[in-house]
Amino acid sequence: MVNSELVLNGQTYAYTIYAIVVILFILGFAYQVTKPGKAGVLKTSLFVVLVVCLTVLGVSLHITTSKTIPWVPMDLNRADIKPDKVFNITVVKHQFQLPSDKLEMKKGDIVVFDVTSNDLTYGFGIFRQNKTMVCQMQVVPGHKNDLMWKFEESGTYTIRSTEYSGPEGHQMILKDVVIVNE
Ligand SMILES: [Cu+2]
């Protein structure tokens, strides 16, 4: 699985470069058609080549990144996967109730976070130390909400609610409670 942070950074750079090329192309075109004097006409063949290149680049960005969304492969096969650990978590009155103080696992373990809400709709998100999100799901009362995940990097992670659940919702943070050992 590809780290979501890597996907995000990669896409940021790739699409920024792509957008800059397109903007330069349009600026160049605008300059050509508005400059005084004899218009320097862009050769039709060159124009076609540029448009085709941009199209191929744009489409291949989508194709190469389509399988990099980290949660796709595991979710497609999750019925056949037996998790190494299941953490049963309850949420009530804007409080997460964990089965133990810390949720510990080994790097590469397949774990399931089975979260039940007894009152409102909440969110369950796992965040890195730099506050970027690893994964999240919605926690709806009266429904089964379980998230299967495999941590590819050891470290300490924080649980936060990722859904607005009223004014008290912002305090739903359990700092450094998910421990992924090497
Ligand atoms: Cu979109």
Image: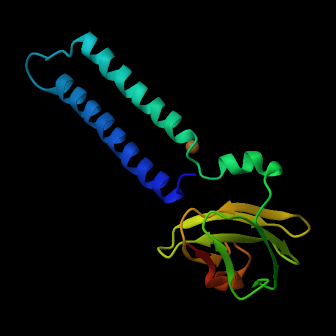
- Quarter location, residue 43: top left
Which quadrant of the view contains residue 19?
Answer: top left
Total marks in image: 0
On screen, 105 above or below 151?
A: below
Camera-side residue: 83 or 163? 83
Q: Quadrant of ligand 1?
A: top right
In the rendered image, is residue 93 in sight?
yes
- Using residue 10 as the reference point, say whether residue 32 is left or right of it: left
**Closer to the camera in the image, 9 or 154:** 154
The image shows residue 51 at horizontal and vertical percentages of 35, 22
Pinpoint residue 144: horizontal percent, then vertical percent: 87, 64
- Toward the bottom, the furthest residue is 101
Task: In the rendered view, tell whether residue 91 sits above or below residue 29.
Answer: below
Look at 65% across and 52% down and name the residue there: 71
Tell me if I can see residue 163 in this picture.
no
Picture quarter containing residue 58?
A: top left
Residue placed at 57% from the left, 62% from the top? 152
**Residue placed most toward the observer, 48 or 135:** 135
Q: Measuring 18% from the left and 24% from the top, which residue is drawn there? A: 32
* 96 with respect to 14 (left or right): right
Q: How is the image coloured?
A: rainbow
Percent of width and height locating residue 148: 73, 60
Residue at 47%, 73% (x, y): give it: 130
